[in-house]
Image (cartoon, rainbow, N blue to C red):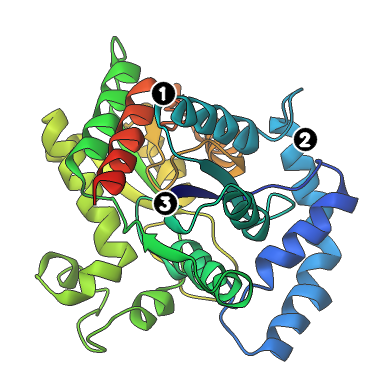
């Protein structure tokens, strides 16, 4: 029997420091997120970061928390419910971090008799710290608990025509009637070394502006290339002039060289260049979360206005939009047929 496991990032149980701290510990101690030896990672995370960050992060979560709970969880559940209503095979929803674990999701499917699972990381672009960590953990659980279960992994869908159309339509609808100076495509950042680590050729990725445009097998797992390709395809569909949009990378930890240009640096400098009205879309996420609702829609907006910006529009993610639900449903239908 076939079934589907939708996997998103996750969320603390509450926006209180006591719940944020164990969530951050699980997330930051993931070797695919902070990819250094265990002892160094433990010293960095538990000895330094977790001594100060839980309170700061808890404050940020409180800023965006809904009465129903974490926006990411609530929106993911709404999307899941719509998808399940449209297909006739079991669909489970889980998170990589937090209480809605992959282990629980697989058990839910197993208990319904599922032996063939469509493993669906809800990330358009492939990255170690998102897609890979989901695939690795799910496979570890499968081998240990459900050796007769089969996985069909959904690859990165950054360039799938129906996803690109969903994203372009979402942007078009939100920009209707808005006379903007610049559309910013802000993707979640990752350390540059992650790009080199996922380079299957071990030589292609130079991160110098040319490698992402040069055809290579490395692109199948290159987050940077896939981000730029998503932007290119959407801009093409929206017929955006090249001087009307830009791509940046948000969220980073100090001490490492991360993908550039940085979202905060670029947005803060725009008013001084005469760019006073902007819109920001976050295509690394299909569901609104802390990084979109607090970091962009609140903090980036505030900083932009402090620096002389006049209008700031944060474009929502696809969330549980009917068109996106239809796309996911169609992909599941294709899985059922094969």
Decide if residue 138 is on the left or right side of residue 222. right
Above or below for 296 versus 111: above
Q: Is residue 335 visible?
A: yes
Above or below for 247 versus 133: above
Total marks in image: 3
Residue on which disc 2 sits: 62
Front residue (pair 230, 5): 5
Decide if residue 106 is on the left or right side of residue 87. right
State if disc 1 and disc 3 touch (CB < 8 Å). Answer: no
Front residue (pair 62, 321): 321
**Which residue is located at x 56 percent, y 35 percent?**
76
- Residue 313 is marked as none
**Label 3: few (<14), some (14–19) or many (≥20) C-alpha neighbours in 10 Å:** many
- Report which quarter residue 37 is drawn in: bottom right
- First in sequence: mark 2 vs mark 3: 2
**Which residue is located at x 49 percent, y 66 percent?**
149
- First in sequence: mark 3 vs mark 1: 3
Q: How far apart are marks 2 and 1 (CA)?
A: 25 Å
- On the image, the x and y values in percent for residue 89 come to 44, 39
Disc 1 secondary structure class: loop
- Report which quarter residue 240 is drawn in: top left
- First in sequence: mark 2 vs mark 1: 2
Front residue (pair 209, 267): 209
State if disc 3 and disc 2 touch (CB < 8 Å). Answer: no
State if disc 1 and disc 2 touch (CB < 8 Å). Answer: no
Q: Nearer the viewer, mark 2 or mark 1?
A: 1
Q: Distance between the residues labelled 3 and 1?
A: 16 Å
Disc 2 secondary structure class: helix
Above or below for 261 versus 301: below
Residue on which disc 1 sits: 321
Residue on which disc 3 sits: 123
**Which residue is located at x 75 percent, y 48 percent?**
12
């Amino acid at each position: 029997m076939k079934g589907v496991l939708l996997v998103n990032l996750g969320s603390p149980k509450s926006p209180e420091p006591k719940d944020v701290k164990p969530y951050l510990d699980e997330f930051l101690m993931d070797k695919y997120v902070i990819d250094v030896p265990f002892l160094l990672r433990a010293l960095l995370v538990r000895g330094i970061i977790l001594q100060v960050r839980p309170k700061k992060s808890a404050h940020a979560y409180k800023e965006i928390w809904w009465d129903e709970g974490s926006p990411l969880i609530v929106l993911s559940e709404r999307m899941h419910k719509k998808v399940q209503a449209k297909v006739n095979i079991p669909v489970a929803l889980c998170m990589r971090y937090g209480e809605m674990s992959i282990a629980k999701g697989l058990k839910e499917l197993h208990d319904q008799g599922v032996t063939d699972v469509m493993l669906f990381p809800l990330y358009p672009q492939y990255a170690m710290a998102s897609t890979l960590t989901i695939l690795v953990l799910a496979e570890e659980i499968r081998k240990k608990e459900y050796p007769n279960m089969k996985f069909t992994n959904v690859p990165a869908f950054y360039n799938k025509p129906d996803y690109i159309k969903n994203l372009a339509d979402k942007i078009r609808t939100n920009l209707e009637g808005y006379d903007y100076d610049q559309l910013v495509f802000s993707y979640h950042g990752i350390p540059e070394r992650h790009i080199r680590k996922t380079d299957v050729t071990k030589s292609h990725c130079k991160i110098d502006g040319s490698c992402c445009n040069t055809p290579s097998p490395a692109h199948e797992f290159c987050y940077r290339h896939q981000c730029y390709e998503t932007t290119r395809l959407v801009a093409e569909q929206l017929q955006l002039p090249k001087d009307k949009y830009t791509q940046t990378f948000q969220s980073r930890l100090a001490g490492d060289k991360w993908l550039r240009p940085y979202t905060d640096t670029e947005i803060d400098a725009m008013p001084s260049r005469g760019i006073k009205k902007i819109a920001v879309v976050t295509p690394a996420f299909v569901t609104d979360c802390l990084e979109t609702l607090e970091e962009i829609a609140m903090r980036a907006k505030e900083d932009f206005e402090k620096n002389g910006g006049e209008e700031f529009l944060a474009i929502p993610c696809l969330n549980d939009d009917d068109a996106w639900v239809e796309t996911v449903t169609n992909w599941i239908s294709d899985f059922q047929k094969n």
